[in-house]
Amino acid sequence: MTVQDDKRAAAWAAAEEVTDGMVVGLGTGSTAAFLIARLADRVSGGLRITAVATSLATERAARDAGIMVVAFDDLAEIDLAIDGVDEIDPQLRAVKGAGGAMLREKIIAAAARRMIAIADGSKRVAVLGAAPVPIEVLPLARAFVAAQLESLGGSARLRVIEGRSYRTDQDNAVLDCVFPDRPDLAALATQLSQIPGVLGHGLFLSEIDCAYISAAGVVTRLDR
Ligand code: 5RP
């Protein structure tokens, strides 16, 4: 049993919660890729769904797999969002955004009547905080925001990939920020949102209603 098998098992369990006629928010990342593949199978078997995507990569993958994807622009509410996580604690609070999609992921999670997290067992933690919190930043504000994060006790690093500043689907920069003192997360989330120039962050403290986590082939369902 590999990590990939566990990602697939968690994603397939969540895919069973998708029913005919739903509008489904599709997450981003390697675990969400298994979800997309499973839903594509079910669609080819007759399931009718409409999807919205949390990233351009997910939109392409879902369309290529034969899932109907619509623009989120005109939707205020969707039925179900299913997405991966970087860390998840026993209260179903999570850190997301290693793939850089946390802003769209947060909007789609907020619009969803229900959100399911899918993960392999390595993502399960007792206390959040080992994974950096990704913060999407307007590029011109990045030094200012980094300084503000330092004043909150964080240590921020500009995300750089192949020698270039990473850009999100919205063409913004990402600061990955570690908070060594493990602050109160609810207060931190509020403080992050109040920094001018911060467009979104990867703390998902209240969005997740249910999680399927697979470890060594055993899928566990956790409910809030
Ligand atoms: C992307 C995300 C992903 O859901 C998260 O990084 C998990 O990815 P993976 O399933 O590849 O481990 O938040 O922004």
Image: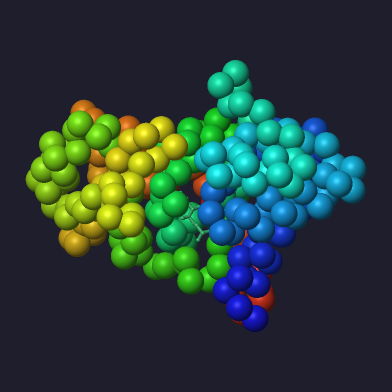
Give residue 22's position: percent from left, percent from top. Answer: 75, 35
Residue that appears at 12% across and 48% down? 150
Report the coloring of the rendering: rainbow
Give residue 101's position: percent from left, percent from top. Answer: 45, 44
Quadrant of image for the N terminus: bottom right
Q: Is residue 9 above or below residue 168?
A: below
Q: Is residue 198 shown left or right of residue 223?
A: left
Residue with the most extreme front position: 163
Number of numbered discs overlaid on the protein picture: 0
Residue that appears at 60% across and 22% down? 75
Q: Is residue 127 shown left or right of residue 22?
A: left
Of 204 and 66, the residue lying toward us: 66
Of 96 and 173, the residue lying toward us: 173
- Give residue 14's quadrant in the image: bottom right
Give residue 72's position: percent from left, percent from top. Answer: 58, 26
Residue that appears at 48% across and 71% down? 122
Q: Is residue 134 shown left or right of residue 87?
A: left
Give residue 52's position: percent from left, percent from top. Answer: 63, 34
Q: Is residue 117 shown left or right of residue 144?
A: right
- Give residue 71's quadrant in the image: top right
Residue 209 can be seen in this image: no
Of 171 and 14, the residue lying toward us: 171
Residue 203 can be seen in this image: yes
Q: Is residue 45 above or below residue 104?
A: below
- Give residue 189's quadrant in the image: top left
Residue with the most extreme right position: 46
